[in-house]
Image: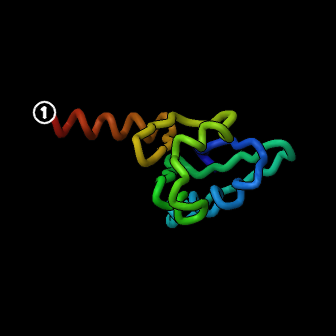
Amino acid sequence: MKDPVGPVLRMGEEVDQIVAAIEDDNPDIEIEVIDRGSYVRIQGEERVVLTEATLQAYLGSDYRIRSLENLMSSFSGRAITASDSITWLSAGAHKAGAAHTEGARS
């Protein structure tokens, strides 16, 4: 996989549901799950998104995206956080987005 990005989660009872939520939020991206025993690396190529709404569909309406921080020991790529989502971007995808934004401002 070229430019893999995504979270690294400590093992816990919520991991399978988080993986399912990430797969749902990224239907056009191959999501790879690497189980290392004490942690799981979840990755996709260049851009992976996770929304609070999808997490809540799997983990209940009171689950907040910020709760993911308790399980996320690390991540690859650049993490862009919002109140209702996290997006992990590769350096190349981030630069392309910044260039697009700069072009729109001109």
Specify whether 88 is left or right of 16: left
Question: Of all residues shown, which one is farthest toward the front?
Answer: 62
Residue in front for this viewpoint, 8 or 14: 14
The relative height of residue 46 versus residue 95 in the rendered view (above or below) is: below
Specify whether 19 is left or right of 85: right
> At 84% from the left edge and 42% from the top edge, which residue is drawn?
38
The relative height of residue 94 versus residue 63 in the rendered view (above or below) is: above
> At 53% from the left edge and 65% from the top edge, which residue is drawn?
57
The relative height of residue 40 versus residue 22 in the rendered view (above or below) is: above
What x and y, as percent, mark residue 17? Answer: 66, 61
What x and y, as percent, mark residue 95? Answer: 39, 34
Residue in front for this viewpoint, 42 or 106: 42
Q: Residue flagged by tag 1: what amino acid is it?
A: Ser
Residue at which label 1 appears: 106
Which of the image's four quarters has the C terminus?
top left
Residue in front for this viewpoint, 14 or 19: 14
- Residue 29 found in image quarter: bottom right
What x and y, as percent, mark residue 66? Answer: 53, 41
Question: Of all residues shown, which one is farthest toward the right?
Answer: 37
> At 52% from the left edge and 48% from the top edge, which residue is drawn?
64
Numbered disc 1: secondary structure: loop
Specify whether 4 is left or right of 86: right
Colour scheme of this structure image?
rainbow
- Residue 77 found in image quarter: top right
What x and y, as percent, mark residue 18? Answer: 63, 56
- Residue 6 found in image quarter: top right
Specify whether 95 is left or right of 67: left
